[in-house]
Amino acid sequence: MNVVFSHGSKSHPWGKKITALAKIAKEKNHQVDSIDYQDLADPDERVDRLLAHPIICNQSSSNTVLVGSSMGGYVCAAAAEKINFKGIFLLAPAIHIKGLGIRQQNLISKSNKISIIHGFEDEVIPYQNSISYAQQNRASLYLLCSDHRLTSALAEIENIFANFLDSLS
């Protein structure tokens, strides 16, 4: 499988969470890439960049997993509205919020294997937004005792991600 990561608006392609999850994917012999969006503030331009990525354009999306954190979660969810990916793994996704230049608010995924992780103590994006998205898309939802960055729950997230990848094999 291919695992493609999308970082948040103020993060970078190989931040702590992405690096940790990419290591797990590599250990399971999956191909890994993380897209750099640091030059793009517009969320929908980030979606376009993801959809234009060679892994997605040149290979089967049915063998690709998208992983997105915060704004990257929105990017993955918006891309999954257009293409049926093998799986979507979202971390505190920036969905169902006003502002940040996000135009689409009611995203319905073509992918049927979606897992979402969100922190109860998220001070940036209310966890209730993930509950709503999970209900709309019949997604698995994990609410953890953590803030927006989710770093205090990284070990738990790693276990959930490993199980998510195994469920797709």
Image (cartoon, grey):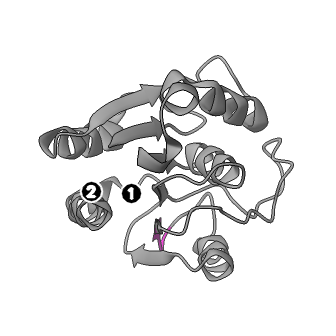
Q: Residues within 10 Å of mark 1 (few under 14, many from 20)?
A: many
The answer to whether residue 64 is visible is no
Segment colored magenta: 116-121
Which quadrant: the C terminus?
bottom left
Look at 66% across and 46% down and name the residue there: 79
Please say if the residues under marks 2 and 1 sit with CB atoms less than 8 Å apart. Answer: yes
Secondary structure at numbered mark 2: helix
Q: Residues within 10 Å of mark 2 (few under 14, many from 20)?
A: some
Q: Is residue 11 above or below residue 163?
A: above
> Which residue is identified by label 1?
150
Q: Name which quarter of the figure residue 167 lies in.
A: bottom left
Q: Amino acid at mark 2?
A: Leu
For the residue pair 119 and 82, the one nearer the viewer reads as 82
User: Left or right: where does residue 18 sit relative to residue 65?
Assistant: left
Look at 48% across and 28% down and name the residue there: 55
Look at 58% across and 21% down and name the residue there: 38
Give residue 125's position: percent from left, percent from top.
Answer: 63, 61
- Give the total number of marks visible in the rendering: 2
Secondary structure at numbered mark 1: loop
Instruction: Specify whether residue 45 is painted magenta.
Output: no
Look at 24% across and 44% down and name the residue there: 25
User: Left or right: where does residue 62 sit relative to residue 104?
Assistant: left
Which quadrant: the N terminus?
top left
The answer to whether residue 120 is visible is yes
Give residue 78's position: percent from left, percent from top.
Answer: 70, 50
Q: Amino acid at mark 1?
A: Leu
Give residue 43's position: percent from left, percent from top.
Answer: 73, 37
- On residue 154, which mark appears? 2
